[in-house]
Amino acid sequence: MPKLRAAALTDIGRVRQRNEDRFVCDLPSMVFGVADGVGGLPGGADAAQCAVDEVVTAVTAQPVDPKIDLTAVVHHINLSVHNLGIKLSPSMGIGSTLTFGYVREKTLHIAHVGDSRCYGLRADRFHLLTEDHSVENEARMRRARGETVYYHEANRNALTRCIGQPTPPLVDLVDRPLQAGDRYLFCTDGVTRLVRDSELAEIVERDATPEELLHEIVTLAVRRGGPDNATGVLVFVDDVS
């Protein structure tokens, strides 16, 4: 069984009145991730909390199953958040991003909807393992297929899919076989919009504990203005034997 260390940290930032980010960092179950309540909609904190609660329930309900149908899990979570939105905000609904992973059979299985992120560090190479589901990114991918796409610059960061929408969202899945020395960072856009990927890489690869490095990352985002809640989960893979 892989030997892991992990830490989680969230900060309300300097502008928002509420923290609508949530995280899961469950070492015994080896489940990790973040959720970010969608801004502009009521009940963002409720949506994010419901999402992470459902993640833990779904994964821990199958403790001996090496491979869980993550698409089905995320669709179930989406329905739960959508139904909660009907109660809390029938006219507008509620929504959240959700990026999480669980470890089974020496593999990290990642599911992703929205613009929170998961990064992986391996052998001094730091990679973004997820793709933001934003208007700008979707337009870029469609243009790469030869389509003509226009969007207003003010909407470039708007989400194209989230947890809680009326129809089941497309779910990005990543399976990452673990290696000793790997490090994985799950974080919300309150971090990534303030701290460049190159800076994240430089911090994550330092010789320090997950708690120390994550505190540095979140503190840096807040020190640069903290316009949004900033949340991260950092996982160290010490051994996979």
Image: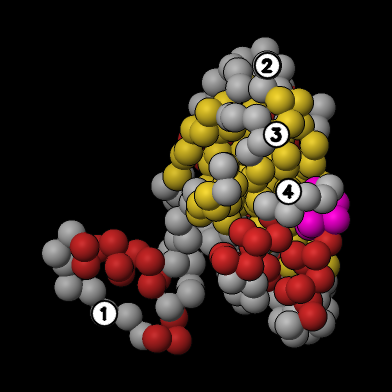
Quadrant (top left/top right/bottom left/bottom right) for the C terminus = top right
Instruction: Kindly identify which residue carries mark 1.
Output: 150
Q: Is 32 or 47 nearer to us in this picture? A: 32
Foreground tag (3 vs 4) = 3
For residue 62, side relative to residue 210 (left or right): left
Residue 237 - label: 3
Residue 213 included in the magenta stretch of the image: yes
Quadrant (top left/top right/bottom left/bottom right) for the N terminus = top right
Magenta part of the chain: 210-214
Classify mark 1: residues with Cα within 10 Å, few (<14), some (14-19) or many (20+).
few
Nearer-N-terminus badge (2/4): 4
Between the C-alphas of marks 3 and 1, the distance is 42 Å
The local secondary structure at tag 3 comes to: strand
Residue 234 - label: 4
User: Is residue 93 visible to us here?
Assistant: no
Between the C-alphas of marks 2 and 4, the distance is 21 Å
Residue at 49% x, 33% y is 175
